Image (cartoon, rainbow, N blue to C red):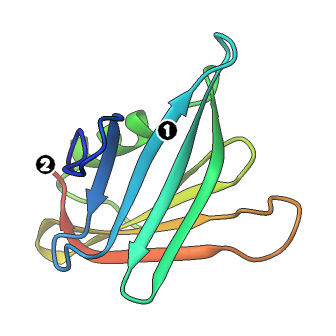
Amino acid sequence: MDSPDDGTDDKPSVTIRCQDNASVGVTFCDRFSFDADSVHYAVEMRAPGLTARVNEVVAWTWDSDLTTFLEALAADYRGWDGERSWQTNDRDLTVSAVFQSGGHVGLTWALRPWPQAAGSWQLGCLGDHLA
């Protein structure tokens, strides 16, 4: 995970890259807030043949946030059974995690630019270590 991104613009961002293929990643950027109850940000996905962006993903302060979800995965470094997932209240961003042998975690990110319609962009990376 990089923070801030190594890009040339001065806006803060966070990029999570696949350990096995650095061209695969998810970037959180362009954060803003209208009030104390929510944070808005853009999410970008990149992989060979895929560039996708949702300009306004909303995280509500009363929901469990993504940081808490990722910290819980790292805390369970010995593994777990099944799939764990997290999503925004509007379901425009979803992250699923599966524990694999050797302490590896497979993450699948889904962006739904049209929350009321079927379909999404998905990006997965198997083999990332949680640290």
Characterize the local packing of mark 2: few (<14), some (14-19) or many (20 or more) Cα atoms within 10 angstroms: few
Can you name the residue that lies furthest to the bottom here?
49
Across and down, in percent, residue 80 comes to: 32, 60
Q: Which mark is residue 131?
A: 2
Towards the viewer: 93 or 87:
93
| Residue 88: quadrant of the picture | top right
Residue 33, placed above or below residue 53: above
Asked whether the viewer can see residue 65, the reply is: no
Label 2 amino acid? Ala
Can you name the residue that lies furthest to the right here?
116
Residue 47, placed above or below residue 45: below
Across and down, in percent, residue 105 comes to: 27, 66
Identify the residue position indicated by label 1 in the image: 30
Question: Residue drawn at (18%, 54%), measured in percent from left and top?
Answer: 130
- Horizontal side of 123 relative to 23 (left or right) equals right
Asked whether the viewer can see residue 122, the reply is: yes
Question: Residue drawn at (48%, 59%), measured in percent from left and top?
Answer: 44
Q: Is the Cβ of the residue at disc 1 closer than 8 Å to that at disc 2?
A: no
Label 1 amino acid? Asp
Task: Kindly report the distance in space between the C-alpha atoms of the residues bearing marks 1 and 2.
Answer: 26 Å
| Residue 13: quadrant of the picture | top left
Q: Earlier in the sequence, mark 1 or mark 2?
A: 1
- Horizontal side of 77 relative to 125 (left or right) equals left
| Residue 70: quadrant of the picture | top left
Q: Nearer the viewer, mark 1 or mark 2?
A: 1
